[in-house]
Amino acid sequence: MAWTRKDLLAMRDLDAAEITLLIDTAASLEEIATREIKKVPALRGKTVVNLFYEASTRTRTSFEIAGKWLSADVINFSASGSSTAKGESFIDTAKNIAAMSPDVVVVRHSSAGAAAILARELKCGVVNAGDGAHEHPTQALLDLLTIREKKGHLDGLHVAIVGDIAHSRVARSNIHGMRKLGMTVTVAGPPTLIPPHIQELGVKVAYRLEDAIRDVDVIMMLRLQHERMTPGLIPSSREYSHYWGLTLDRLAAHARPDVLIMHPGPVNRGVELSPEVADGPYSVILDQVAKGVAVRMGVLFLLAGSRNAGD
Amino acid sequence: MSSSPPKFREKAEVLDESALDRALTRIAHEILEKNDGAKDLTFVGLRTRGVTLAQRLAQKITRIDGTTVPVGTLDITLYRDDLDMRGAPVVRGTDIPFSIKGKTVVLVDDVLFTGRTIRAALDALIDLGRPRMIQLAILVDRGHRELPIRPDYVGKNLPTSRRESVAVRMREHDGEDRVVIEEPEDA
């Protein structure tokens, strides 16, 4: 199995073998994080541009560290304080960056499809680091790597994704990835936050937290995406927390004792997760962050290290 | 695009099972002689058959000397100088569960050819720590060096032409212990 794509845009585009190759590559690079000298020369002389039109700490830092550990030159470009603020269009900015001959551009944008437009316009590799409510493939890959390491396998596992499914690119990327790898997915949340026809993606739907978390191997809690929400979808954060907040009592009453609790971050403590759960023994939230660097190293390595890149 | 790789056929047998075993026994004795025993000795094999050879050498040293020499696995994909020429690479990971700092590391590989793999392996090893000394053990040295690299222990010196290929087959991977020279089928 060899990697042949120029870009990584969506889990929906990939087949099971490609997803497995990405996870395997990431797993083999994890060891670099434990070294005294955290640097290998694999991408020496390659340039990675982080092009972030939306706020991000975790993802941008993660791509930056990943690129640097592989010896690439990493340049960060954020929309504020740049030519975007002076009125330059998205595609003009992209073409200007392309003229500087990067090998990979990592892009985050509030519009679905932004990464795909960039991939069409640029000859270099493009990684989608989140486009609107569409997809966030590297998040799904790091979730899959975390689950595989904790559970030993992926096939046959049952995952509940709980919360704001409608606005979540993390949910969409995970649903596509997990279904392709033979996993069962239940999505759950208030009806206003569950998109109509979501069943067509091959998932089950639950409208009560207790129903969703019973007998599942993994519970993935999502953040309420206030920045993407129109008013009126939920009455209040407090009411949401009352019905959908994951607490130790609810876990003990309804979930399996070996369940994993995941969250893509940033966590709204006391809303979707109680602090005791977020910091508790079931939680693998910080493992997810560590795996994020490995996954992004794997993605950069496969895109920039292959002969397709920069042709 | 690229043409399919040429098919190879067997031209001659270089080592049979017992010759291969005798070569490894001799190398094990040479390692002990050169290093005054097995103190502070570690083996690092290059994926895939170098690891198997390193494990066999470690077993032989245990039999001769009674000491256990740790064996690690090195993957040099991230250190290659020809990534752009080879297309999408597969990384299989390095696994050296012991410190090489201050140790004598014997690097083990099956075939020594241009020396570029060993160059990459030296860089990879030194990034993991500062060994006191690195030595090189090779089952077959087939010549055609492109870098100033010389093995310390050699199972068999084997003059070859560049178009030939040397196949080291090992029980654990190929069901037999044998070394053969292969040539392209269109020859």
Image (tube, coloured by chain):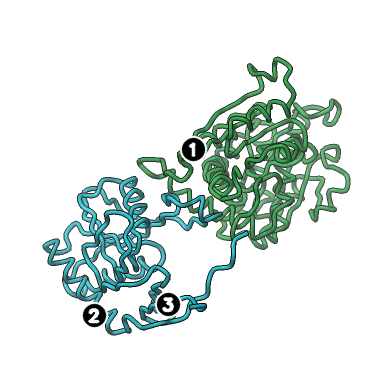
Chain colours: A green, B cyan
Question: Spatial distance from mark 2 to mark 3, Cα to Cα?
Answer: 23 Å
- Who's the residue at 52% across and 42% down the image? A290
Q: Quadrant of residue A109?
A: top right
Figure check: A268 above or below B128: above
Question: Spatial distance from mark 3 to mark 1, Cα to Cα?
Answer: 39 Å
Q: Chain of mark 1?
A: A
Q: Earlier in the sequence, mark 2 or mark 3?
A: 2
Figure check: B11 above or below B109: below
The residue beneath circle 2 is B22
Q: Quadrant of residue A53?
A: top right
* Badge 2 vs badge 3, beta-carbon distance below 8 Å: no
Q: Nearer the viewer, residue B10 or B111?
A: B10
Figure check: A145 above or below B155: above
Q: Are marks 1 and 2 on the same chain?
A: no
- Who's the residue at 36% across and 78% down the image? B179
The spot of residue A46 in percent (x, y) is: 51, 39
- Who's the residue at 76% across and 40% down the image? A134
Q: Residues within 10 Å of mark 3 (few under 14, many from 20)?
A: some
The spot of residue A148 in percent (x, y) is: 58, 55
Q: Chain of mark 2?
A: B
Q: Residues within 10 Å of mark 2 (few under 14, many from 20)?
A: few
Q: Nearer the viewer, residue B174 or A35?
A: B174
Amino acid at dot 1 = Ala
Q: Nearer the viewer, residue B50 or B15?
A: B15
The residue beneath circle 1 is A72
Amino acid at dot 3 = Glu
Under circle 3, the secondary element is strand
- The answer to whether residue A254 is left or right of residue B127 is right
Question: Spatial distance from mark 1 to mark 2, Cα to Cα?
Answer: 46 Å
The spot of residue A17 in percent (x, y) is: 64, 60
The residue beneath circle 3 is B182
Amino acid at dot 2 = Arg
